[in-house]
């Protein structure tokens, strides 16, 4: 039986969820506080796990068209330019890199016209035997269930999980940008106390990110690009050139935070999804990918269920039981990776270990099935009866 869901938040997680619900024959109302549907920020990569979920939504073709193959960990370098590991010409890579706006757009294209309501900031919700009502300044809507996909500062989490600690600053800060520089293969350069990531993205551009240790959050600089350039002036090319080529206003500076682990992602007819449930440090490039996984698993749990209270709550409990262990393990891993790759104390041991690792073994670890996170396969979604 098909039902109606309210999705709060029109980011990558919320839109992926709307696409997944459509795929099983449900209807969704997506409430987004921004005035227009858009994804701000720079770039990102998607790994085989999330790319398989996009295939399940029928979006594999558009994802391959919008994404650019990238090596990142296939080309690991030191700030003086030496390679610790290097991809060979012709090596396959399972990662695709995107401009965030392109990934957002391809999901948005999968959401039926009229499902998205922008300029709508949700402030309250209440549930009863028959459904859930969601309210904003000037209106409300009712549905069989609610998905809180409203990001790391989630109002749904605040309302239904009171007392949950706020996002935790992880002692790292990041500068990000998009430069009009094409043809780069993707790489990570490991410095002591920070690393620099490059991904090629569509239309002859490169996404870069510099993640560095920081004593406190909210340290901001008058000119963020100048600060990033100053810190990286002695690093190998094309790093200084990429920063120089990035328009000043395209340099973003953010602090790295994650969430304490929740004991459940579900309260009755309400479920959290994406960063609202499990915001994680970006060091495994998995946050948005995990939200896409959430969407396909939630749809699989709901498919064919009746919209009565017991059936909906049962489906959401199955979603919670399946997603919480995996997303929380990924978040713990990302937090640990971030600490390891930016810790000055661990730097020498880390770079020596990578340099000494046989190239074949290194390549195996970054192949499509090379690690546990990437090996994940989505459940098959049934097509709705027509
Ligand atoms: C530096 C950095 C690099 C990253 N790199 C990667 C990567 O390479 N690969 C990857 O998979 N992930 C990456 N991530 C993680 C990724 O960005 C997030 O996990 C992902 O964007 C989360 O999507 P979301 O839809 O859950 O939340 P969000 O993107 O935060 O979307 C939430 C939406 O909800 C809306 N909203 C909020 N409150 C309300 C309200 N009250 N009412 C209505 N709407 C509301 C917001 O406006 C927003 O549109 C990275 C993160 C960072 C910080």
Image (cartoon, grey):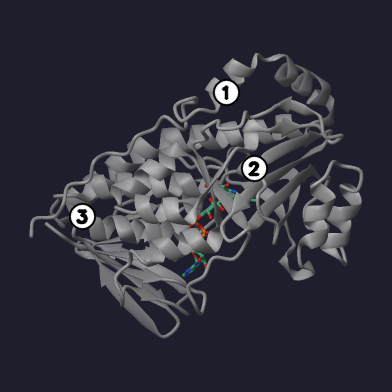
Q: Earlier in the sequence, mark 2 or mark 1?
A: 2
Q: Is residue 281 visible?
A: no
Name the residue located 37 percent from the left edge and 41 percent from the top edge: 52
| Residue position marked by numbered label 2 in the rendering | 185
| Residue position marked by numbered label 1 in the rendering | 363
Give the secondary structure at mark 3.
Answer: loop
Name the residue located 76 percent from the left edge and 28 percent from the top edge: 83
Looking at the image, residue 84 sits to the left or right of residue 12; the answer is right
Instruction: For marks 1 and 3, give the CA distance.
Output: 38 Å
Residue 225, position as x, y percentages in the image: 83, 61
Instruction: For marks 2 and 1, give the CA distance.
Output: 16 Å
| Residue position marked by numbered label 3 in the rendering | 24
Give the secondary structure at mark 1.
Answer: helix
Name the residue located 53 percent from the left edge and 21 percent from the top edge: 364
Within-10-Å neighbours for mark 3: few <14, some 14–19, many 20+: many
Against 259, residue 66 (above or below) is below
Q: Quadrant of residue 197?
A: top right
Q: Is residue 377 visible?
A: yes
Q: Quadrant of the C terminus?
A: bottom left
Name the residue located 44 percent from the left edge and 55 percent from the top edge: 65
Are dots 1 and 3 in contact, CB under 8 Å?
Answer: no
Q: Quadrant of the N terminus?
A: bottom left
Q: Earlier in the sequence, mark 1 or mark 3?
A: 3
Give the secondary structure at mark 2.
Answer: loop
Against 225, residue 170 (above or below) is above
Against 226, residue 174 (above or below) is above
């Amino acid at each position: 039986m098909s039902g109606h869901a309210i999705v709060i938040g029109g980011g990558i997680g919320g839109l992926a969820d709307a696409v997944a619900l459509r795929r099983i024959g449900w209807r969704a109302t997506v409430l987004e506080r921004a005035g227009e549907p858009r994804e701000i920020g720079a770039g990102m990569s998607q790994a085989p796990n999330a790319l398989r979920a996009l295939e399940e939504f029928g979006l594999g073709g558009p994802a391959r068209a919008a994404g650019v193959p990238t090596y990142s960990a296939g080309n690991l370098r030191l700030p003086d330019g030496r390679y610790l590991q290097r991809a060979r010409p012709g090596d396959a890579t399972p990662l695709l890199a995107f401009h965030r706006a392109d990934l957002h757009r391809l999901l948005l294209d999968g959401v039926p016209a009229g499902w998205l309501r922008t300029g709508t900031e949700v402030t309250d919700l209440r549930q009863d035997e028959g459904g859930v009502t969601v309210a904003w300044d000037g209106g409300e809507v009712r549905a069989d269930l609610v998905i809180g996909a409203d990001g790391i500062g989630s109002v749904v989490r605040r309302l239904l999980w009171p007392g949950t600690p706020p996002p935790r600053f992880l002692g790292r800060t990041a500068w990000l940008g998009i430069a009009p520089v094409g043809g780069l293969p993707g790489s990570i350069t490991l410095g002591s106390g920070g690393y620099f990531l490059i991904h090629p993205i569509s239309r002859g551009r490169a996404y870069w990110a510099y993640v560095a240790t920081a004593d406190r959050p909210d340290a901001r600089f008058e000119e963020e690009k100048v600060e990033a350039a100053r810190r990286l002036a002695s690093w190998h090319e094309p790093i200084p050139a990429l920063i120089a080529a990035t328009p000043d206003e395209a340099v973003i500076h953010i602090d790295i935070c994650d969430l304490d682990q929740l004991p459940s992602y579900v309260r009755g007819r309400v479920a959290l999804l994406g960063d609202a449930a499990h915001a994680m440090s970006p060091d495994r490039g998995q946050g948005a990918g995990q939200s896409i996984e959430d969407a396909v698993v939630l749809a699989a749990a709901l498919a064919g269920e009746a919209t009565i209270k017991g059936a909906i709550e049962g489906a959401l409990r199955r979603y919670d039981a399946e997603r919480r262990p995996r997303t929380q393990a990924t978040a713990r891993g990302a937090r640990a990776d971030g600490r390891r790759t930016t810790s000055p104390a661990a730097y020498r041991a880390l770079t020596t270990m990578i340099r000494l690792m046989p190239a074949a073994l290194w390549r195996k670890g970054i192949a499509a099935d090379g690690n546990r996170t990437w090996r994940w396969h989505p459940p098959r979604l049934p097509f709705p009866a027509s």
